[in-house]
Image (cartoon, helix red, strand yellow):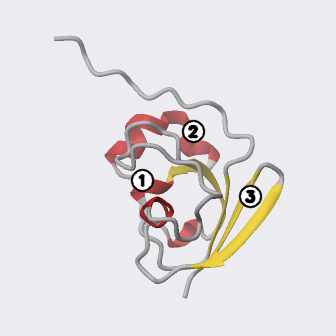
């Protein structure tokens, strides 16, 4: 089972998840990583689950269009939207020190 380490508020929180798990879905139903993971919409729009990948990023798929749109240059800093990832391997991430993400606004009609 994949081992997950989350760094937040200067603390490290560790647990295991089943393969092919989405951490935001799990937190939403109050399973680890709840309550240690910040998240919002779960759909890749708000950016609240933005995390910097410390270890295990090589096992993640390439960023999708939602991550590219919301994160922009933050992708170059190793940030990902956790709601968009299904975890199959060990992963270490941090939600400390992430610059504020301002999601793009929809175009006016």
Where residue 37 sits: x, y (%)?
60, 55
Where residue 56 sits: x, y (%)?
61, 71
Where residue 96 sits: x, y (%)?
73, 46
Badge 2: few (under 14), some or many (20 or more) residues near its Cα, within 10 Å?
some
Between the residue at mark 2 and the residue at mark 3, the CA separation in whole angstroms equals: 18 Å
Res. 7 mark: 3
Q: Quadrant of residue 53?
A: bottom right
Residue at horizontal 52 percent and vertical 51 percent from the top: 80
Left or right: 78 as drawn, with respect to 31: right
Residue at horizontal 40 percent and vertical 77 percent from the top: 20
Res. 21 mark: none
User: Where is the N terminus found, in terms of image quarters?
Assistant: bottom right
Secondary structure state at the residue bearing disc 1: loop
User: Where is the C terminus found, in terms of image quarters?
Assistant: top left
Between the residue at mark 3 and the residue at mark 1, the CA separation in whole angstroms equals: 21 Å
Residue bearing the label numbered 2: 74
Residue at horizontal 83 percent and vertical 52 percent from the top: 10
Relative depth, front residue between 45 and 27: 27
Q: Quadrant of residue 77?
A: top right
- In this rendering, the answer to whether 80 lies above or below 87 is above
Please name which of the two marks, 3 or 1, marks the residue nearer to the observer.
3
| Comes first in the chain, label 3 or label 1 | 3
Residue bearing the label numbered 1: 63
């Amino acid at each position: 089972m994949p081992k997950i380490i989350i760094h937040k508020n200067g603390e490290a929180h560790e647990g295991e998840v089943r393969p092919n798990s989405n951490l935001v879905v799990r937190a939403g139903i109050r399973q680890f990583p709840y309550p240690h993971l910040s998240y919002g919409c779960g759909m890749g729009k708000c950016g609240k689950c933005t995390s910097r990948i410390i270890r295990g990023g090589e096992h993640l798929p390439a960023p999708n269009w939602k991550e590219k749109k919301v994160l922009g240059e933050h992708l170059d800093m190793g940030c990902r939207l956790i709601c968009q990832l299904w975890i199959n391997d060990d992963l270490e991430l941090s939600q400390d020190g992430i610059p504020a993400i301002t999601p793009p606004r929809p175009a006016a009609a």
